Amino acid sequence: MNGHVKNMHLQQRVEKAATLLCFLLLLAVDSTKTVAASRNQECGYDLQQTLRLSRQVHKETGNLIKKYKASEGEMAELFCKASVSGIPDPNISGLEPSERIASIYTQLQVFSPHLKRVHEQQMDLQPKSPLLNLINIVRDQSRRLTLRINNIYRNFFPNLPLSEPAGGPTTLPPPQNVFQQKVYGCVVLTTYRKLLTNIFKDMRTLKSKVCRRAPASEFNFFR
């Protein structure tokens, strides 16, 4: 009899322990889903803000190009369609999301010295030109976009180092005459706008790939 009672008590304790274990497992699963949903939402928010900024820089660059062409008169279209060596490629490379984001970051960095050179040349050509303020707006927004891309990469892929542009500092053109400066400036701006178009398209694609379908092993990529 005593043995039977002991067995009943033991069975009851085992059942209670099993019930508690199931409850804890369900709680853990629910908590994981909640955390994953929260991180996914934050991922979408970060990329959405970056999309808005890239669209804004694209818009401001387009406005700058229009004003730039207007200031140059009838020759502007020829300036902007000329072939200039040393201008960075506006295309984005890589297959994986990490490679694409790293490529965006690199291309923004490579273009930065060229935008600075355009500003310096414009200062020499027309020190009081309203274009100077427009160029500064584009440069400032581009710096902000570069920082956002940097932060996104480091948050999503903390275990993958973000490489700096290969080959050291960006190579800029040697001293140019007035005509060459005008051509260079317009080609830099139009090519940079192509890069911004590619960035906007890429970030939309990455948003759907990285945020919505991130596996559990990638949850630590998000803050």
Image (cartoon, rainbow, N blue to C red):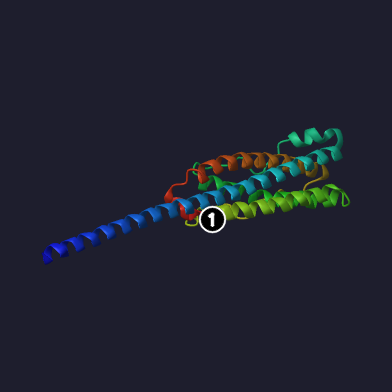
Are there few (<14), some (14-19), or many (20+) residues within 10 Å of tag 1? Answer: some
Can residue 129 be seen here? The reply is: yes
Q: Residue at x 73, y 49 (%)?
A: 115
The quadrant of the rendering that contains the N terminus is bottom left
x then y, percent, for residue 70: 85, 38
Q: Residue furthest right?
A: 128
Residue 104 relative to residue 212: left or right:
right
Q: Residue at x 63, y 55 (%)?
A: 147
Q: Residue furthest front?
A: 1
x then y, percent, for residue 136: 77, 52
Numbered-mark total: 1
Q: Which residue is mark 1?
A: 155
The three-letter code of the residue at mark 1 reads Asn
Q: Residue at x 12, y 66 (%)?
A: 2
x then y, percent, for residue 101: 56, 47
Foreground residue, 222 or 80?
222
Foreground residue, 182 or 14?
14
Residue 198 relative to residue 18: left or right:
right
Foreground residue, 172 or 17?
17
